[in-house]
Image: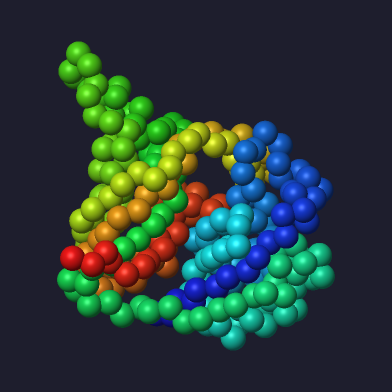
């Protein structure tokens, strides 16, 4: 398994123009779909996900299972408007670790969409679901606690990692634009609102292969639109 960490610096003005030009801002609070289409235009089937757009000097970070040489070539041959909008003149890549020792501790940060998909195909905030399922007269769990439980389950997929410490660094509701194909033609653009949470903390690797797969896949839903990228850093000193 290969994993590459890449970075570019989207131009804010050009990005807004691109999103408006292709109707990718209708009713949306973020530019996740616009960035999704730009990455697809630049890299094709090698379009990286998950990704995280910071909107500051950090630019856009993403993971890809393609090697750095393939990504560099795609960046160099991207159409001029795509190249300029994504800021690919400052494109950088490096191979990212895929071998992790069981028991290794690491700090992390992640932006997630803590939702579950219902049988009817709708997405529901896991905090709202927990509140509705409560049998107590008053629901006493905090949003942070409910989201932390959801995050614990996401990290445990494939026995990947165990959550050791976590804190909710930011929360707000955002609306994003989503499009897709449907039988008989294109599905109209839809405004999808939901929770937008940023967590930081520490985890312990449990299954090395499962953890590598989790990094490549990302956490939760909307991973192709700016959510779910698990960023790692050294753990806090004891």
Q: Residue at x 22, y 77 (%)?
A: 101
Q: Nearer the viewer, residue 236 or 227?
A: 236
- Estimate the x, y position of residue 74 in percent, counting from the top left: 68, 77
Q: Residue at x 62, y 44 (%)?
A: 30
Q: Nearer the viewer, residue 219 or 7?
A: 7
Q: Residue at x 35, y 53 (%)?
A: 200
Q: Does the rendering let one see residue 23?
A: yes
141 vs 111, left or right, is: left
The total of numbered circles placed on residues is: 0
- Quadrant location of the C terminus in the rendered image: bottom left
37 vs 7, left or right, is: right
- Estimate the x, y position of residue 131 in percent, counting from the top left: 29, 24
- Estimate the x, y position of residue 193 in percent, counting from the top left: 54, 34
- Quadrant location of the N terminus in the rendered image: bottom left
Q: Does the rendering let one see residue 150?
A: no
Q: Residue furthest top?
A: 137
- Estimate the x, y position of residue 199 in percent, counting from the top left: 37, 49
């Amino acid at each position: 398994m290969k994993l590459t960490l890449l970075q570019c610096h989207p131009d804010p003005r050009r990005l807004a123009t691109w999103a408006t030009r292709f109707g990718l801002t209708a009713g949306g609070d973020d530019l996740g779909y616009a960035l999704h289409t730009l990455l697809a235009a630049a890299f094709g089937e090698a379009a990286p996900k998950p990704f995280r757009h910071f909107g500051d000097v950090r630019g856009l970070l993403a993971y890809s299972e393609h090697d750095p040489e393939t990504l560099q070539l795609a960046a160099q041959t991207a159409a001029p408007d795509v190249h300029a909008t994504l800021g690919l003149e400052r494109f950088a890549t490096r191979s990212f670790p895929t071998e992790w020792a069981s028991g290794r501790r690491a700090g992390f940060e992640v932006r997630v969409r803590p939702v579950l998909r219902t049988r009817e195909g709708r997405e529901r905030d896991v905090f709202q679901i927990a509140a509705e399922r409560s049998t107590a007269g008053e629901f006493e769990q905090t949003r942070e606690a409910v989201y932390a439980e959801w995050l614990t389950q996401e990290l445990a997929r494939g026995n990947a990692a165990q959550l050791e410490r976590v804190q909710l660094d930011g929360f707000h509701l955002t609306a994003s634009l989503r499009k897709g194909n449907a039988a008989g033609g294109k599905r109209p653009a839809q405004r999808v609102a939901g929770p937008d949470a940023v967590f930081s903390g520490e985890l312990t690797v449990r299954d090395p292969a499962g953890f590598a797969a989790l990094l490549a896949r990302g956490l939760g839903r909307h991973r192709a639109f700016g959510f779910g990228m698990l960023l790692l850093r050294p753990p806090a000193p004891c």
